[in-house]
Image (cartoon, rainbow, N blue to C red):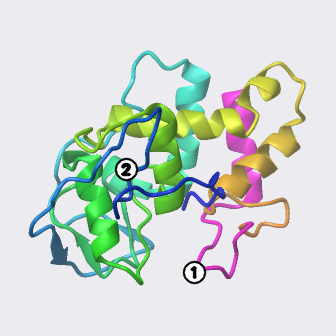
Amino acid sequence: MTCLLPHPVAAQNGSLFVQRAGATLAATSAGSLFQRASVHGFISPLPDTGPDTGDVASGALPSEVAALLDLIALAEAGPAGYNAVQHGARIRPLDHPTQLTLGEIFDWIKATPGQPHAIGRYQFIPATLRRLVWIKGYGPATRFSPEVQDRLALILLKEAGLEAFQTRALPRRTFMKNLARIWAGLPLPNGRSYYAGYAGNRATMSFARFEEGIEAVF
C-alpha cells in the first residue's frame, strides 16, 4: 500500500479531483460501478484473467528503474499486477483497474467510504493518488493504464531519492528506508513494515530479500 503522506490539496465541487493551474477537473459519473467479490490472499485480482498485467509497461524506462518497480510491485501487488485491488475492499470496482478512468476510480472511492481503496500495481491510496494525479495534471477521462501507473510511481521514486541514490549521494540503506516509508509492503531493517499494525499493513518480503533485490538491480 502506498502510504506516503500527501501534500495538502483541496477537493473541488465534491470531487476527488483537484484544481490545478486554474482548471477544475470534475469527476465523471460512474453509474453502477461496483460489485462484490470474494477475497483470497493478501491482495486479490478480479475473478477473470483480464488484460495483460506483465512487467513495467513502458519500454522506455531505464532497466534499473524498471527492475526496481518490479521489486516494489512484487511486494505490493503480487500476481494481480496493474489490476490489483487491496483485499479489504468489500465493494470492488466493476471492471479491472486498468480499464477504468481516473474519474471512475475516484467515484468508486467516494461512493464506498469505510473500506481500503489501495489500487493498481503500486497500491496507491486515495490521498497519494489524488496528489500524484494533480502533479501530472491528469483529468478524469485519463485511463488508469499501466503506463499511467508507472508514471505516477516514478514520482514517488524521485521523492524517495532515486537520483541521489544512483549518484551515490544517498546511502543504500537510507534509500531503502525511504522506499519503505512510501510502500507498506517493503520492510525496514527490523523486518517490519513502517506501517505495521496500521490498517492491517505488513511487510510482504524479508529485509534480506529486499536488500538482495536492491543490490541485484543497482
Instruction: Tell me the SS state at disc 1.
Output: loop
For marks 2 and 1 on the same chain, the one whose residue lies earlier in the sequence: 2
| Residue at image point 44% right, 15% down | 60
Q: Which residue is mark 1?
A: 200
| Residue at image point 23% right, 56% down | 104
What is the three-letter code of the residue carrying label 1? Gly
Q: Please state the horizontal and vertical placement of residue 11, each as a whole percent of the image.
A: 44, 58
Q: Residues within 10 Å of mark 2 (few under 14, many from 20)?
A: many
Instruction: Tell me the SS state at disc 2.
Output: helix
Q: Please state the horizontal and vertical placement of residue 68, each as a whole percent of the image.
A: 60, 35
Where on the picture, by quarter, is residue 212?
top right
Where on the picture, by quarter, is residue 75?
bottom right
Question: Which mark's residue is nearer the viewer, 2 or 1?
Answer: 1
Q: Residues within 10 Å of mark 1 (few under 14, many from 20)?
A: few
Residue 97 relative to residue 168: left or right:
left
Q: Report if residue 140 lies within the magenta region.
A: no
Above or below, 57 relative to 145: above
Q: Which residue is mark 2?
A: 81
- Distance from disc 2 to disc 1, alpha carbons, whole Å, reads 20 Å
Highlighted magenta segment, given as a residue range: 194-218
Residue 12 relative to residue 194: left or right:
left
Q: Please state the horizontal and vertical placement of residue 94, each as a whole percent of the image.
A: 15, 65
Residue 202 versus residue 3: which sits nearer the camera?
3
State the residue lying farthest toward the left: 32
